[in-house]
């Protein structure tokens, strides 16, 4: 068995360590934070096979351009002369064709389905510590155009054997007895589930610590020691850490970390915000995406989280309050009597989705080194895809046949 160093303790790094440990490897996780506030922590917590359409898809660019015109829309690219952004944008544009999307859907679907099943297995093994509910997710719409689009998507889902139920307002209202709904209708994807991502991370971390996985937290990776086509050690501000195999799972920072190995990864950070309301008196029963406004609503036990926006404005860009307010306004528009008030600014969370330019993650070995595996670019699906990604990385480390074909996730594509 190998000693594996996992760089990054977001949900991808943690799930990777989980499967590596279970198959007998020694594992060390290095993270520059404390795993209690990052992108994997404050997101909407959906595990959603319903999201089988990759981000790069026909029509997305036209829609994005339209949204760019409004300062309160759910999408924004900060215009800047940045070569990485330009390269990413051009690749995204090329990969948004119907033929590429259609080629990618079965691969994303296979990864989502595997991950959905494994997430339930993790819950069965670790216990129900992370508020997981397997009741599906609603796609709610207000406009006729969005209704048509969602019903078309439901037909595409049927082709992948994903069940859906198209519901009218009366049927939806019966499912949400505590809050008034102001929508035209919706589609339920019963296969989806939701959970509290911070509690999931804590539960996996506890398991890992109890089973001998080492953690080097508050430890910043600043470089690598390299031999002939081999990584010899990870250099951090707390010293050098060594292993037989190295997995890079540093989320939106994957390009920065891999650049130190001479490896170029195309990725942009997609900022999103969330607000969490505790002990909501009249709470939602079902998680829902408010499709016209791209807002995600997730009941998490007695709490309620709402989140959204996609801002491609670089790492370290400021919080844009107008867009955060739009998330809240959309929630109040769909659920007029929701008993929540707009929070203080210090209660607003944001995270950076690691966006590959085709909407598929990077999972696999890199040919530049014989002991390097990259795992990142999970975009808006990191929680949905983490379990399968962790399992696949364990299989790659162990030179096993992978559970699904991983050619589409090639890290050098
Ligand atoms: C608003 C919002 C809602 C979302 N909702 C959902 C959802 O409902 N379902 C879903 O599936 N996904 C969702 N996502 C996406 C999901 O959160 C991400 O895909 C996922 O968290 C990415 O996980 P990761 O482990 O790759 O990256 P991260 O969670 O960002 O982890 C990377 C880690 O690497 C560490 N790191 C980086 N650089 C260094 C360094 N130099 N040295 C040491 N450590 C380093 C960081 O500290 C970090 O802890 C949402 C995202 C946002 C923003």
Image (cartoon, helix red, strand yellow):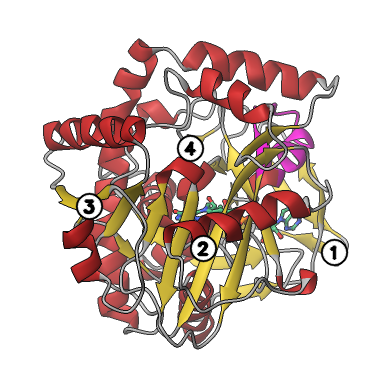
Q: Would you say residue 230 is visible in this rendering? A: no
CA distance for labels 1 and 4: 30 Å
CA distance for labels 3 and 2: 23 Å
Above or below, comparing residue 115 to residue 18 in the picture? above
Q: Is residue 261 magenta?
A: yes
Identify the image quadrant of residue 157: top left
Upstream in sequence: badge 4 or badge 2? 2
Q: Which residue is mark 1?
A: 239
Q: Is residue 289 left or right of residue 310?
A: left
CA distance for labels 1 and 3: 48 Å
Q: Is residue 293 left or right of residue 252?
A: left
The one of 259 and 401 positioned closer to us in this rendering: 259
Q: Which residue is mark 4?
A: 361
Count of all numbered marks drawn on residues in the image: 4
Residue at 78% from the left image edge and 50% from the top image edge: 320
Identify the image quadrant of residue 229: top right
Upstream in sequence: badge 1 or badge 4? 1
Callout in the foreground (1, 4) = 4
Q: Position of residue 368 (x, y in %)?
A: 63, 27
Magenta stretch bounds: 253-270
Q: Marks 4 and 3: CB-CB under 8 Å?
A: no
Q: Position of residue 74 (x, y in %)?
A: 60, 42
Upstream in sequence: badge 1 or badge 2? 1
Above or below, comparing residue 106 to residue 117 in the picture? above
Upstream in sequence: badge 3 or badge 2? 3
Q: Which residue is mark 2?
A: 332
SS for dot 1: strand
Q: Residues within 10 Å of mark 4 (few under 14, many from 20)?
A: many
């Amino acid at each position: 068995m190998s000693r594996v160093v996992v760089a990054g303790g977001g949900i991808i790094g943690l799930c990777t360590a989980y499967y590596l440990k279970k198959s007998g490897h020694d594992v060390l996780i290095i993270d520059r934070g404390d795993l209690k506030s990052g992108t994997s922590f404050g997101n909407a917590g959906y595990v959603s096979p319903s999201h089988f359409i990759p981000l790069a898809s026909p029509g997305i660019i036209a829609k994005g351009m339209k949204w760019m015109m409004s300062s309160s829309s759910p999408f924004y690219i900060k215009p800047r002369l940045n070569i990485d952004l330009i390269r990413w944008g051009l690749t995204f544009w090329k990969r948004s064709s119907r033929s590429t999307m259609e080629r990618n859907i079965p691969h994303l679907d296979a990864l989502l389905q595997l991950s959905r099943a494994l997430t339930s297995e993790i819950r069965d093994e670790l216990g129900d510590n992370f508020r997981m509910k397997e009741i599906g997710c609603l796609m709610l719409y207000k406009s006729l155009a969005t209704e048509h689009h969602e019903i078309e998507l439901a037909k595409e889902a049927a082709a992948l054997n994903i069940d859906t139920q198209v519901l009218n307002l009366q049927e939806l209202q019966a499912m949400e007895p505590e809050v008034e709904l102001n929508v035209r209708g919706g589609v339920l994807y019963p296969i989806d589930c939701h959970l509290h991502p911070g509690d999931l991370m804590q539960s996996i971390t506890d398991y890992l610590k109890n089973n001998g996985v080492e953690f080097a937290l508050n430890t910043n990776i600043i470089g690598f020691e390299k031999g002939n086509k081999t990584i010899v050690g990870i250099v951090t501000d707390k010293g050098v850490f060594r292993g037989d195999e190295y997995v890079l799972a540093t989320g939106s920072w994957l390009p920065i970390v891999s650049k130190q190995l001479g490896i170029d990864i195309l990725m942009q950070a997609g900022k999103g915000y969330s607000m969490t309301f505790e002990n909501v008196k009249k709470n939602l029963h079902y998680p829902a995406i408010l499709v016209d406004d791209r807002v995600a609503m997730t009941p998490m036990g007695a709490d309620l989280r709402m989140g959204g926006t996609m801002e491609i404005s670089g790492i370290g860009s400021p919080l844009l309050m107008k867009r955060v307010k739009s998330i809240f306004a959309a929630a109040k528009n769909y659920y007029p009597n929701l008993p929540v008030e707009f929070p203080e600014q210090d209660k607003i969370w944001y995270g950076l989705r690691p966006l590959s330019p085709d909407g598929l993650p990077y999972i696999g070995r890199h040919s530049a080194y014989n002991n390097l595996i990259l795992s990142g670019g999970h975009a808006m699906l990191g929680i949905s895809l983490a379990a399968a990604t962790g399992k696949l990385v364990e299989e790659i480390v162990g030179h096993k046949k992978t559970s699904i074909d991983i050619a589409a996730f090639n890290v050098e594509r």
